[in-house]
Amino acid sequence: MVAPAAAGIATVCASTSLTGVVAGVAWFGYVLVAVLLIACTGLALRSLRAPTLVVGLSQLVVLTFLITGVFTSEGILGIIPGPAAIGQLQDVLISSAEQIRTGLAPVEPTPAILCLSTIAIGLVAVLIDTLTVAAAAPAATGLVLLCVYAVPASLSNDLLPWWTFVVGAAAFAGLLAVDGSHRHRRWRNRTAPGLGVSAESTAAPVTVVSLALVCGLLGGTITAVGTVGSIPGDGPGSNMAGGTGGLGVNPFTNLRGLLNQGANVELFRVRGLQPNDPRLLRAFTLDFYQPNQGWKLADAPRMPAGDPANMPALPLAPGDSGEGQSVELQIEPINWVDVWLPVYGAPRALRGISEGWFYDRKSGAVFSERKQRSPAYTEVASLRVPTKEELRAEGTEIDRDLDPVYTRLDQVDPRVRGLAQQLTAGQASNFDKSVAIWQYFSSQNGFTYDTQTAAAADNDALADFLFNGKRGFCEQYASAMAVLLRSAGIPARVAVGFTPGVTTAGYRTITSQDAHAWVEVYFNDQGWVSFDPTPLADGRGYIPPYLRPDDQPTDGPATSGNDTQEMPSTSAQAPNDVPREETGPQEQQQAQETSLTQAPDGFGWGVLALLLLAAAVTAAVVMAMSRRLGGRGSGAAAVPGGVPPPGGGSATLALAPWLPPVITGLWVLVVAAAAWLWSIWLALPVAVVVAVVAGPWTIREVVRRRRLRTIAADGAGAADAAWSELLDECADRGVPAQTADTARMTAFRVAQKHRLDDDGQAGLRTVVGVLERSWYAPPETKVPEPDFAPAFDRVRGSLARNAPMSWRGRLFPKSLLRRRRNRRES
C-alpha cells in the first residue's frame, strides 16, 4: 500500500512542473484524477496477484477510458473508445500540437492542452508505478521524473518555480526511503505486501512495459527540447507543403503564436524618434535560404566574432560614411529577454549596456551569448534615408567585397525564377527591379494578409504561396520577396524586428503585436535598405520616401496596407548558431566560439537514437538476468529452491563481462548529450557527476563478471574466484569478513549474519568444500566439480533474498576499498 502511494505522490509532485507552461490550476485536477485511477487499479489487481504485464496493460486501459470519457463525446457507453471517439481524440491532439507550436508559455488550459497533459502524466504514472512496485526499483524512477521536468523547462523562457523542484525532490526522496524501509523489513524476515512475486516472473514484462514507456516519453522530450513554443515537424498551419517542408523563417517559428496569444505584451519604450518617423526596429537578420525550409542564419560553423558592443564607437555599418547627423535614441526594454538587442538604422555607438554584448557589422545585429534582460540603453545611430534618385543611380553593379552569401540561392523552383525575370524585365537598375518585385505583393495581384496560410496545393511551399495561396503574414511575404530578389541577382536578406508602434505619453510603445519581418536590399553606396512587402491594413506599416509615388509628400509618414504583426524574440527561439547558456566571464574570444556551447542542428535525433540503443542493451541484460536469477521475491520462486537451470547461473552473466562498462558509457553519453541540448556547460559537469557515480558500480560489475566467467569454466582458480566474490558480496552489504578466520569460520559467520536459508547454506557448504580441496589437495587429484557453479549461484540467490543489497551498496561498493587495502597490506 505504501509503495503505490509513494509512486503516485511522486508523480503528482513532478507534474507541478507544468505550472511553467500551462496557465491556471485546472490541469491539476485532471492529472490528480488520472494518477489516483492508475494507482487504485494497480492496487486492486495486485491484491488479486495479477501478473505484472496484466497490471500495466489494465492501467493503460483505465487511462484510455478516462481520456475518452472526459475529452470525447462519441465513446461507446461514454468511456470505451470506438472509431468515432478515436477520430475525435485525434482532432483534439492535433489541436493541442498546434497550440503548443504557435502558443507562448504559459498556454491557456484549453481542452486540447488538458487532454495532452492528462495523457502525458498518466503514462508517467503507469511507468513510475511499474518501476516502484513491480520492479522494486524506485531509484530508476529518477530518470523518468527528470524527463517530466525537462519538457516544461525546455518550452518555457523563464525558470520553473523553485518550489516545483523542492516538492519533486522531496517526493523522490520519500520514494527511496519507502524502498529502503521495505528492503529492511524483508531482511528481518517480515512480510512486505504487494511484492511477493519472483524476479523471473516480473522482470521481463516490467522491462517490456518500462522500455516502451521510457522511449515514448524521452522521445517526446528530446524532440521538444529547445523549440521554445513549437513542435518540430508537420502540422496544420505550419507552412508544410505536401509534407516536404515549409516556407518560413526558422528562428521565429512562433510569430503567429504571439498574435493568437490574445494578450498584447509591452516590449519596449523608445524616446528620441520624431513623431513622423515611423521607423522599423531591427533585432537580427537572416541571410541563408534553405529550399522548402526557410530562412536562417548563414550556414557557418559559428557566429561571427563581433566587436564588444559597449566600445566607445562601433564599426560603421555598410553604407554609413560616419558623416551626417547622429541621433540619440533611448530604448527601454520592458518584457524583453533574449540573445538579441534591437537597434535602429545604422548604429554608431551603444551606451548603458554591460559586457557580454557584441556587435556584428555584417549582419547589423547586437547579440549576447545567453538570453538575458537588458537594462535601458542608448543608441547613437545614423537614421539617414536615401532618396530614390541615389538608389537608382547605383545601377546594377554589385560590390565585389560583398559576402556571396547574400546572393546565394540553391534549388529554387524554375517557376519562381521565371516570375522574378518577368517582373524585372526592362528595368535598368537594381532599385527599379526591387521596386517591381515589391509592387507585386499587392491586393491587386490577389495577396491578402492572414495569420493562417492557405491550404497547400503544390509540393513547393514557396511556389504555392506565390502562385496559388497568396495568403499569409509577414514571414511568408518577406521570405518570398527575398527569394525573388536573389533570383533576379540582387543581394537581399530577411530582417526580423518590429513595426513603429504607437506614441504614448512622450515615448513610443512597441508591443508583441508590432513584431514583424521585412526585406533588406543591398546597395553599394547606401548599404542595406528596407523593403516591406507585407500588405498591412491597420496603420502599422511604413512606406519610406524612396518607395512612394513622385506626387506624394516625402516629409510625413506613409503607411502600407497590412494587418497586425508578430514577434521574433521574447520567446522566439534563438538561432542554433548562438549558444543560450554561458557561465563565467563573457569575453570576445568566447563569442568567437559560441557554436561549441550549443548542440548542432538535428542533435536531438542523435540523442534519441543513442537513448534507444542504451535502453535496448539494458533491457536485453535485464531480461537475461531475469532468466538466471529466481526467487528474489518473498513468494515462490520460478525455479524450485531458487536454483537456476543447468547451463544458466554464472555462465549467463559470464557471457559478456564487457557489458557493464558499455552500458554505463552509453547512459553517460545519453545524459551528457541530453544536457548539451541546453548547454555544454551543463553537459560537462553532468557527465562528470554521472561518470563518478557510475564508476564504482562499473568496476565492481567488471570484476564480478570476470570471476563468474572463471567459475562457469570450472578451471584453475574457480574456487578462489568464488571465495573472493563471496567476501566482496559480504563487504558490499556492510559486513566484511575477518581476515584471521578460517574458511569454515567465515562461512559460518556469513550464514549467520545474512540469515541464509537452507538452500543457501547447502550451497555454501559445497563452495567451502571445493575451496578447501583446491587449497590443500594435491594438484594431480583435481577433478571436475559440476555442482560447484550451481552451488555458488544458490549462495548468491540466498543472499539476494535474505540480505538484499542497499542502493548505496550497489553504487558505492565497499569491496573496492577492501581489495585496495588488501593489496596495500600485501
Image: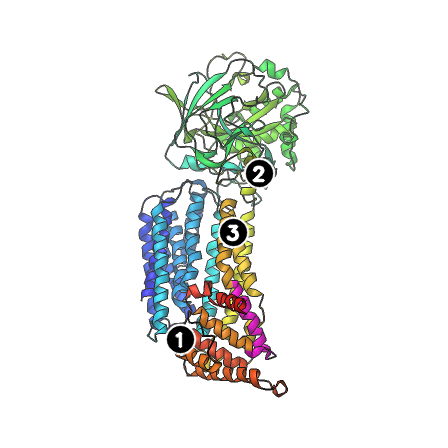
Give, as a three-letter code, the residue at label 3. Ala
Question: Considering only vertical position in the picture, is 461 above or below 26?
Answer: above
For disc 3, the marked residue is 672
Closer to the eye: label 3 or 1: 1
The percent coordinates of residue 75 (x first, y second) are 37, 57
For disc 1, the marked residue is 802
Q: Are marks 2 and 3 in contact (CB under 8 Å)?
A: no
Of the image marks 2 and 3, the number of the one nearer the N terminus: 2
Give, as a three-letter code, the residue at label 2. Glu
Question: Mark 2 to mark 1: distance in Å?
Answer: 56 Å
Q: Is residue 459 left or right of residue 329?
A: right
Can residue 26 be found in the magenta stretch?
A: no
Q: Which segment did they paint magenta? A: 698-719
- Mark carried by residue 593: 2
> Count of labels shown?
3
Please, which residue is most extreme toward the bottom here? 781
Q: Secondary structure at mark 1?
A: helix
**Between residues 454 and 779, which one lies in front from this camera angle?**
779
